[in-house]
Amino acid sequence: MYVVFALVVLAAVAIPFVLSLRSLKKTGSARKAVKVNLIAFAAVALLCAAAPFMASAAPAEDAAAPTTTSSQTAEGGMSDKGIGYIAAALAVGLSGIGGGISVAAAAPAAIGATSEDQKNFAKSLIFVALGEGIALYGLVVSILILFT
């Protein structure tokens, strides 16, 4: 089972990378290569997000005596841990994207303000740190999701 997870992780990284490199060589356009990379990544991410649902929909081995473990519900067998992992991944991923966007906007402005006047360094550093704090909040939320 661990081999399957390792192969899925390698596919999630390798497939978009290979497709974007192939697109870059064919067209020579970096914009088209980024679009291909994002589409391929979205397809692999959707497949990985759907995997827990597909695994829970698999038929039981012995239909006469179905068993439910502590991580399965009585209705359909959806794994609580699988949903928790998806929630934790979304918390970290989306907060990381939000933090990256805010730092991408604040850091150049901070550099410009500091280059004009050295006294603005402390103020601009605060704004950059606030943007990075968003990603840290997402990490804390995911830790709380995983360990509660």
Image (cartoon, rainbow, N blue to C red):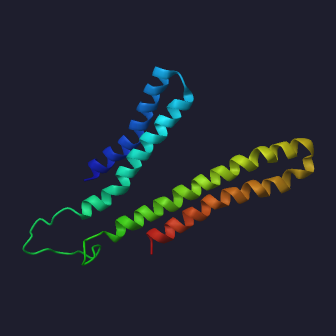
Left or right for 11, reference 133 = left
Residue at the spot 25% in from the left edge and 77% down from the top edge: 75
- Relative height, residue 66 to residue 61 (above, below): below
Left or right for 64, reference 17 = left
Left or right for 135, reference 75 = right
Q: Nearer the viewer, residue 18 or 114?
A: 18
- Relative height, residue 82 to residue 96 (above, below): below
Q: Quadrant of the C terminus?
A: bottom left
Residue at the spot 61% in from the left edge and 61% down from the top edge: 136
Instruction: State the image quarter where residue 84 is shown.
Output: bottom left
Q: Position of residue 139 (x, y in %)?
A: 55, 62
- Relative height, residue 86 to residue 70 (above, below): above
Residue at the spot 81% in from the left edge and 48% down from the top edge: 110
Residue at the spot 48% in from the left edge and 41% down from the top edge: 38
Q: Position of residue 20 (x, y in %)?
A: 46, 31
The number of callouts visible is: 0
- Relative height, residue 12 to residue 67 (above, below): above
Most extreme residue toward the bottom is 74
Most extreme residue toward the left is 64
Q: Nearer the viewer, residue 126 or 18?
A: 18
Q: Position of residue 36 (x, y in %)?
A: 46, 35
Q: Position of residue 125 (x, y in %)?
A: 79, 54
